[in-house]
């Protein structure tokens, strides 16, 4: 696929959705919370891409696809459905694929240690530990 074709596949909804997600992550103060959000978003994108690919391989009778007859409107609708299903799977503790937790645990090791030292020096060590416990529970 040429870069022009890839550019043509980018819709305003896709671009704005990604920009809004990135902007919402940038506003989070805690690096642990940012890491949690990024790892969950990565898993959601992965699951969404997997569902879209699976749909392309399914053929139901003469109509094709998981939702029956394919057309350009249905293709757009399916991408939104798969995007939302991907997000819900990634966020749910019972149905998650597990990438988010693994990514978080691995990348957490590279977070700067000075955040904990600064929190301890200012008397907020318990608050820092509370944030870590909250993030660990949610993932």
Image (cartoon, rainbow, N blue to C red):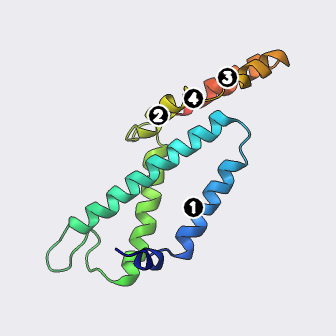
Which residue is pictured at 63% across the width and 41% down the height?
34
Q: Earlier in the sequence, mark 1 or mark 3?
A: 1
Please tell me how crowded label 1 is: few (under 14), some (14-19), or many (20+) other residues with Cα within 10 Å.
few
- Are dots 3 and 4 in contact, CB under 8 Å? no
Which residue is pictured at 51% across the width and 44% down the height?
40
- Are dots 2 and 3 in contact, CB under 8 Å? no
The residue that label 1 is drawn on is 18
The residue that label 2 is drawn on is 101
Q: Could you tell me which secondary element the residue under label 2 belongs to?
A: helix
- Residue 100's spot in the image, x, y percent? 46, 39
Closer to us: mark 1 or mark 4? 4
Residue in the foreground of this view, choosing between 35 and 135 = 35
Q: On the rendered image, what quadrant is the N terminus found in? A: bottom left
- Are dots 1 and 4 in contact, CB under 8 Å? no
Label drawn at residue 113: 3
- Whether residue 26 sits left or right of residue 122 in the image: it is left
Label drawn at residue 59: none
Whole-number angstrom distance, CA of label 1 to CA of label 3:
30 Å
Closer to us: mark 1 or mark 3? 3
Q: Could you tell me which secondary element the residue under label 1 belongs to?
A: helix
- Residue 9's spot in the image, x, y percent? 44, 76
- Are dots 2 and 4 in contact, CB under 8 Å? no
Which residue is pictured at 41% across the width and 37% down the height?
94
Whole-number angstrom distance, CA of label 2 to CA of label 3:
20 Å
- Are dots 1 and 2 in contact, CB under 8 Å? no
């Amino acid at each position: 696929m040429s870069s022009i074709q890839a550019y043509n596949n980018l819709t305003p909804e896709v671009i704005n959705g990604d920009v809004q997600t990135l902007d919402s992550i940038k506003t989070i103060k805690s690096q642990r919370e940012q890491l949690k959000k990024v790892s969950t978003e990565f898993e959601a994108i992965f699951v969404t891409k997997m569902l879209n690919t699976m749909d392309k391989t399914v053929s139901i009778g003469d109509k094709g696809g998981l939702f029956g007859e394919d057309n350009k409107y249905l293709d757009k609708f399916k991408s939104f459905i798969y995007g939302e299903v991907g997000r819900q799977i990634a966020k749910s503790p019972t149905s998650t694929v597990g990438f988010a937790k693994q990514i978080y645990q691995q990348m957490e090791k590279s977070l700067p240690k000075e955040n904990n030292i600064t929190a301890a020096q200012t008397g907020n060590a318990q608050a820092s530990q509370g944030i870590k416990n909250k993030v660990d529970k949610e993932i």
